[in-house]
Image (cartoon, rainbow, N blue to C red):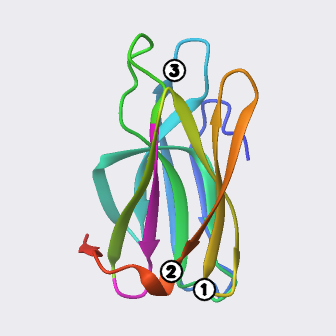
């Protein structure tokens, strides 16, 4: 999904949830970044990339959260997982000088990777049922 400077709207598979990525800017020589809106609830302090992966049961959505948009300090991203039904969020692994890239949900697992220059990729699996530190959003 590439925003090209536009807002993006994504509907969950069951049609109950609408995720909006509101264009905020572009990292110098890099990707667009957006602020996040879920079911008309604005998460102003969350800047995300244009990657959004929704679980087949429409309960979860995973994002690449940008912790800085400063070209000299970044990239610095982390996994952001939302429980859409209970309005909870979980802060996952951080990639200093790299990218957290959510790929897909399989059952109660999220497959994602950490990607670093030059071409270093570390595959990861997050077991969602093991998460203890959800936070209300």
**Image quadrant where residue 119 sits:** top right
Across and down, in percent, residue 21 comes to 51, 50
In this picture, which residue range is highlighted in magenta? 77-86
Does dot 2 land on a helix, a strand or a loop? helix
Residue at 35% x, 70% y: name it: 89
Figure disc tally: 3
Residue at 52% x, 64% y: name it: 19
Does dot 1 land on a helix, a strand or a loop? loop
- Horizontal side, residue 61 vs residue 120: left or right: left
Separation of residues labelled 1 and 3 (CA atoms): 33 Å
Residue picked out by circle 3:
27
Residue at 68% x, 87% y: name it: 107
Residue 108's disc is 1
Marks 3 & 2, CB-CB < 8 Å contact: no
Between discs 2 and 1, the one toward the N terminus: 1
Between discs 1 and 3, the one toward the N terminus: 3
Marks 2 & 1, CB-CB < 8 Å contact: yes
Depth check: give the residue in front, 121 or 87.
Answer: 121
Residue picked out by circle 2:
128
Across and down, in percent, residue 7 comes to 56, 44
Q: Give the vertical position of 27 relative to 108 (above or below).
A: above
Separation of residues labelled 2 and 1 (CA atoms): 5 Å
């Amino acid at each position: 999904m590439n925003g090209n400077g536009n807002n993006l709207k994504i509907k969950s598979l069951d049609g109950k949830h609408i995720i909006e990525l509101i264009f905020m800017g572009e990292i110098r020589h890099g990707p667009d970044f957006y602020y996040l809106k879920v079911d008309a609830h604005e998460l102003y302090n969350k800047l995300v990339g244009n990657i959004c992966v929704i679980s087949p049961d429409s309960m979860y959505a995973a994002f690449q959260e940008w912790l800085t948009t400063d070209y000299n300090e970044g990239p610095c991203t982390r996994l952001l997982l939302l429980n859409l039904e209970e309005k909870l969020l979980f802060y996952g692994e951080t990639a200093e000088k790299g990218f957290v890239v959510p790929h897909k949900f399989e059952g109660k697992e999220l497959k994602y990777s950490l990607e670093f220059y030059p071409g270093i990729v570390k595959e990861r699996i997050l077991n969602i049922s093991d998460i203890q530190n959800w936070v209300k959003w």
